[in-house]
Image (tube, rainbow, N blue to C red):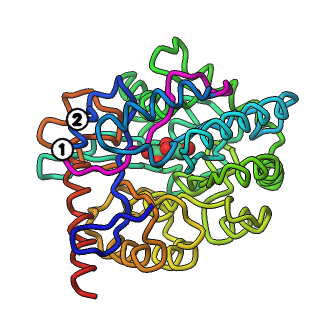
């Protein structure tokens, strides 16, 4: 859908990730800040169950009653068994296809998902001070390795880290407290996972134990096998996508590297090319998350946008700054690379819905109990910044 502003020029659609009626940020608030489209999921339906047409329509009508549309599903979760190739994967794929057909019947046609084993996005710190009273998300490689080696106690984990990281782990070992360990557990596998329909929820009594069991499901699954399983899934669902005009858009892995002994297969140019080539169908596309891709110093995010804008069905506009030792943090939404990414999309694929992501906690956001990375004021400012960028790019044409 093209969005025509009052100067009759075309803009990317301004969307916002909303977590449903329990979200503390309401549709009324979103309407007031100029959001055009909603990105959401049926969070009350457990992973692997069919989304009925009735439930989909209920959500759709609720959103439309506020004058917005349901632009993108984020996510229709892919069950672990489809990812590792369990015995019930065909049954789960059939259910996935039913949900897709029902979305198609309701006219909701962009579906974001990921193919990350066990863990969705990962951060060690959800409240890292920026020095001006605001805070943001941070990934500390030393703390992450500490979690892997000493909290999960994964066999052979040390082998996955370089000497500098192991030195950082040894330093942490000397000063770590039980509270510090608890904080890492919460940040890495609880607070960042449950609300994105992940495997671990806030109510789990022993999240670490549960997490170890989940990791075991991937024993013997390497990147090649995971790629095959992704292609198997995509090939199976493409006929339904064609029939109903559904665009699938996989979210890149965050961070874009193997973690905790798990393979990750949507991390870089070669990976993107591989899954697009494996199933060469225009309905098989990408969520261009500039933030996830920029968390690797090896990725040139502007170049990737240029290359894959036409295979992108959804854009996540945020960007990371990489730091020594494998650390990274969120950068400003006015980072010149992100401005360039917006320019590319405005030129090459202007009807793509976009949302901002992972903005600061600011002006009291921290006390409201919002989901990690999904503040109100921080995201509102980021959206306004991106709107300004779009307006300036238009005006300078
Ligand atoms: C994190 C999000 C991801 C994303 C899923 C899509 O903030 O971008 O959790 O929604 O990976 O399936």
For residue 162, which numbered disc appears in the image? none
Q: Can residue 169 be seen in this view?
A: no
Is 88 rendered above or below residue 263?
above
The part of the image, by quadrant, that contains residue 342 is bottom left
The spot of residue 339 in percent (x, y) is: 32, 74
Residue located 20% across and 59% down the image? 384
Q: Name the residue under label 1.
A: 32
The spot of residue 203 in percent (x, y) is: 47, 14
Q: Residue furthest right?
A: 87
Quadrant (top left, top right, bottom left, bottom right) of the N terminus: bottom left
Is 300 rendered above or below residue 231?
below
Is 207 rendered above or below residue 352?
above
Q: Element type at marker 1?
A: helix
In the drawing, does residue 152 fall left or right of residue 273?
A: left
Q: Element type at marker 2?
A: helix
Residue located 54% across and 58% down the image? 287
Q: Nearer the viewer, residue 192 or 251?
A: 251
Q: Nearer the viewer, residue 239 or 357?
A: 239
Give the magenta part as a residue range.
Answer: 33-50
Residue located 43% across and 71% down the image? 350
Q: Mark 2 points at which residue?
A: 28
Quadrant (top left, top right, bottom left, bottom right) of the C terminus: bottom left
Residue 138 among those drawn in magenta: no
Measured Cα–Cα span from mark 1 to mark 2: 6 Å
Q: Residues within 10 Å of mark 1 (few under 14, many from 20)?
A: few
In the drawing, does residue 28 fall left or right of residue 186?
A: left
Give the tally of numbered discs.
2
Residue located 29% across and 37% down the image? 66
């Amino acid at each position: 859908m093209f969005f025509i502003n009052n100067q009759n020029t075309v803009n990317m659609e301004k969307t916002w990730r909303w977590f449903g009626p329990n979200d503390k940020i309401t549709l009324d608030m979103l309407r007031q800040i100029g959001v055009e489209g909603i990105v959401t999921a049926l969070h009350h339906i457990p992973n692997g169950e069919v989304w009925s047409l009735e439930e989909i329509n209920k959500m759709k009508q609720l959103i439309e009653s506020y004058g917005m549309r349901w632009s993108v599903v984020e996510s229709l979760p892919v069950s672990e068994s489809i990812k590792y190739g369990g015995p019930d994967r065909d049954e789960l794929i059939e259910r996935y296809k039913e949900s897709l057909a029902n979305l198609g019947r309701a006219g909701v046609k962009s579906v974001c998902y990921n193919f990350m084993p066990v863990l969705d996005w990962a951060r060690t710190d959800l409240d890292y001070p920026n020095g001006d009273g605001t805070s943001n998300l941070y990934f500390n490689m030393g703390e992450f390795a500490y979690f892997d080696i000493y909290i999960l106690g994964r066999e052979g984990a040390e082998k996955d880290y370089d000497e500098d990281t192991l030195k950082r782990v040894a330093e942490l070992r000397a000063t770590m407290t039980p509270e510090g360990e608890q904080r890492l557990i919460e940040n890495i596998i609880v607070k960042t996972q449950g609300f994105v329909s992940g495997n671990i929820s806030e109510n789990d009594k022993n999240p670490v134990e549960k997490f170890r069991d989940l990791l075991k499901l991937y024993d013997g699954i390497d990147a090649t096998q995971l790629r095959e399983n992704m292609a198997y899934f995509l090939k199976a669902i493409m006929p339904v996508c064609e029939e109903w005009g559904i665009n699938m858009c996989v979210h890149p892995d965050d961070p874009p590297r193997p973690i905790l002994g798990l393979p990750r297969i949507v991390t870089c140019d070669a990976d993107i090319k591989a899954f697009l080539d494996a199933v060469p169908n225009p309905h098989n596309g990408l969520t261009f998350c500039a933030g996830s891709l920029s968390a690797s110093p090896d990725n040139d995010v502007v170049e990737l946008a240029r290359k894959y804008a036409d295979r992108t069905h959804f854009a996540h506009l945020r960007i990371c700054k990489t730091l020594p030792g494998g650390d990274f943090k969120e950068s400003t939404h006015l980072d010149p690379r992100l401005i360039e990414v917006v320019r590319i999309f405005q030129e090459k694929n202007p009807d793509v819905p976009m949302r901002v992501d992972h903005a600061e906690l600011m002006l009291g956001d921290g006390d409201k109990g919002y989901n990690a990375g999904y503040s109100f004021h921080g995201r509102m400012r980021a959206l306004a910044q991106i709107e300004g960028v779009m307006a300036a790019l238009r005006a300078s044409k």
